[in-house]
Amino acid sequence: MATSLFVISRLPNVYPHKTLQYSKPHNTYWSAGMAKQIVESFIDDIDGSEAEKTTTFAIDGTSYEIDLSGRNREDLEKALAPYITVARPIRAERPGRGGHGADSTSRAMNREKSSEIRNWAKVHGLPVSERGRIASTIVEKYKAAQ
């Protein structure tokens, strides 16, 4: 727990002639001669006991998260185990990648189209790299020729 050191030069009616130093936790607040400490608890969403961690899972395209104790997490893993063992894992798509939600078939179509444009550019003597992005001028020339 982080602590902060506070120097209080005068406490009226207590020690008017002394400078006092107090060390307090970062979540303790001084107020009119009283201290208040706020405690955050990590609570299991199932039974209200102390939770160990947040567990995330998804079904039918909707992601969920739940705070669970070790025992309840084990229960969830046991319940899902028969399904997880036969399921196919998928990679989560990263935001900002893949053409704004393009699926694998449209990406494959784009790869095929890119290959077609590269071949056309080579046949017509235009400079095009083997990999990477195709220059927009070459794409425009390809479209105009079609």
Image (cartoon, grey):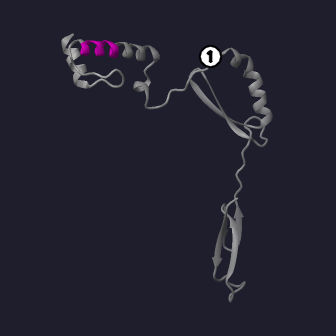
Instruction: Report the front residue among 121 and 53.
Output: 121
Q: In screen coordinates, is 103 left or right of 42?
A: left
- Seen at 49% across and 30% down, the residue is 94
Instruction: Report the front residue among 85 and 42.
Output: 85
Instruction: Report the front residue among 146 and 115.
Output: 115
14 versus 84 height, above or below: below
8 versus 98 height, above or below: below
Q: Which residue is mark 1?
A: 88
Secondary structure at numbered mark 1:
loop
Query: What range of the chain is rendered magenta?
Result: 113-122
Amino acid type assigned to the residue bearing label 1 in the image: Arg
Q: Quadrant of residue 2?
A: bottom right
In percent of width and height, residue 36 lies at 70, 64
- Seen at 74% across and 26% down, the residue is 77
Q: Quadrant of residue 63?
A: top right
Q: In screen coordinates, is 145 left or right of 26?
A: left
In percent of width and height, residue 103 lies at 45, 18
In percent of width and height, residue 68 lies at 73, 36
Q: Quadrant of residue 21?
A: bottom right
Instruction: Report the front residue among 22 and 98.
Output: 98
Verify whether residue 11 appears in magenta: no
Packing grade of label 1 (10 A; few <14, some 14-19, many >=20) is: few
- Seen at 58% across and 21% down, the residue is 90
The secondary structure making up most of the magenta span is helix
In percent of width and height, residue 113 lies at 33, 14
Verify whether residue 114 appears in magenta: yes
Q: In screen coordinates, is 85 left or right of 108?
A: right
- Seen at 78% across and 30% down, the residue is 74
